Image (cartoon, rainbow, N blue to C red):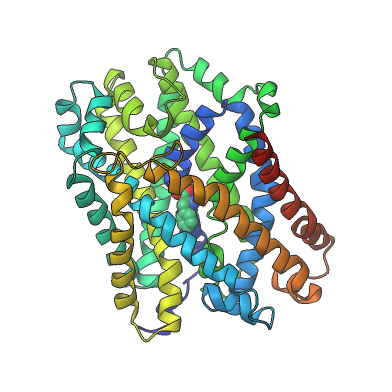
Amino acid sequence: MSPQNEQWSSRYGFVLATIGGAVGLGNIWRFSYVAGENGGAAFLFIYLACVFLIGVPLMIAELAIGRRAQGDAISAFETTGKTSRWRGIGWLGIVTAVLLLSYYAVIAGWALRYAVGAVTGTLWRAAQANYGGYFKQFVSQPVDPLIWQGAILAITIFIVSSGVRQGIERLNRLVVPVLAVLIIVLAGYSLSLPGSGAGVRFFLAPDWDALRNPEVYAAALGQAFFTLSLGMAFFVTYGSYMPRTFSVPASAMIVALGDTLFAIISGLAIFPAVFALGGNPAAGPELAFVTLPQVFLKMPAGVFVGSVFLLLLAAAAITSMVALIEIPVSAMIRRTSLSRRGATIVMGGSVFVLGIPSALGYGVLSHVRIGSHGILDAIDFGVSSFLLPVAGVLTALYVGWRLNRTMILNETDFGTRRIGVVWLWLIRILVPVAILGIFIRTLWAS
Ligand code: PHE
């Protein structure tokens, strides 16, 4: 593989690839149901605060050490601090990415199955409008979900094997602009439906009482980490393919804004339609797979609109799976003698096996409960409410307190500008204290 293929070709390519990594199931499937369950607009308010006060500073930190190290997630936490004591953060990021990918591939597999069904028409005919039953019947089968999980992983492996530039960047250059246009069109359509106003109010008119509920804060923080792809060494990895000439703070701001806009516009595509056609906005993880197809069937031109939506969901999932698998793959290529192709296949195979319990958790393994959660739900809860915030606190402490102040201000491209000092104090104090505060408050309340 030529070394050139292992670096972004341009700033535009880098930004698109990074937005493609950030925009995924988290923006459409997860954001809509988490917002729906946590009171809509009140949640949105805290979520935005988490994105810009905690997320963006951390993203800047991750990108800066990735670009400086030009290495994998583990070495980035060694070489920048000249000590290997902190490299556990890199390992933690890699392990979390693999865990997340294991169940992400299962849901992405559902999305692919629904998208194919929508385009071929089987989704609209077979269900007889009972999508609750349809969904249960599909996810409880012992083999079908595994086939779709395997299929979407195979696509991911194919792309990542082709390299950073020829594979990852090329895919995102193609897909991300299309996703952006489609979601805007879908939102416009949904807002034009009679009765859509109730959905807009639910999503955008704050109910301040919800701010007293500690669970809303924990949900907003977990969602911010998940959707921005923080705490998984993702920005360390993509940052390592970034030449010094790309600005770190500008890139972080564009990616965070792009990701947030995408989530909000998805909300404006989903909630108005759900309200206009009488669905339940707090349906939980099944919102995209049960409520929405039902809503589509009742909508004018719904078969077409629904097919577009599901294709969009599957495509957004693929660009994120590519990003997720690249985290361990990049470390494997740099640390073992495996080729990119070999590493991707080994990792893809391992992720498939690891994801089997999640895939079967709605059928053969539905008796396995962890607390009140099924298998997939329990792993998602552990990852987003525990592992990601812990990695966030550790990264903030490492970058804020362990690294040399002048060095990190230079590496973030802030240099001597005053805004750099603001960033530094956000990372040193606000980020760790806010994350720990939300953590402790949630534990206290439960
Ligand atoms: N942010 C992605 C989403 O919202 C998930 C992801 C996490 C992707 C980490 C890459 C790395 O779906």
Is 185 situated left or right of 408 in this image? left
Name the residue furthest top.
195
Q: Quadrant of the N terminus?
A: bottom left
Q: Residue shown at 66%/78% (left/top)?
A: 80
Place of residue 254 in the rendered image (x, y in percent of width and height, measured from the top left): 59, 53
Query: What x and y, as percent, mark residue 33?
Result: 46, 32
Q: Position of residue 158 (x, y in %)?
A: 27, 66
At 37% from the left edge and 64% from the top edge, which residue is drawn? 170
Question: Residue 301: which quarter of the image?
Answer: top left
Place residue 81 in its image quadrant.
Answer: bottom right
Which of the two residues, 445 or 127, is positioned nearer the viewer here? 445
Decide if residue 81 is in sight here: yes
Q: Residue at x 19, y 32 (%)?
A: 123
- Please state which of residues 12 and 70 is positioned toward the viewer in this rendering: 70
Residue 109 shown left or right of residue 423 in the figure: left
Left-right relation of 376 to 412: left
Across and down, in percent, residue 227 comes to 52, 48
State whether residue 255 appears in this view: no
Quadrant position of residue 20: bottom left
Residue drawn at (18%, 21%) of the image: 128
Vertically, is 182 above or below 403?
A: above
Q: Quadrant of the C terminus?
A: top right
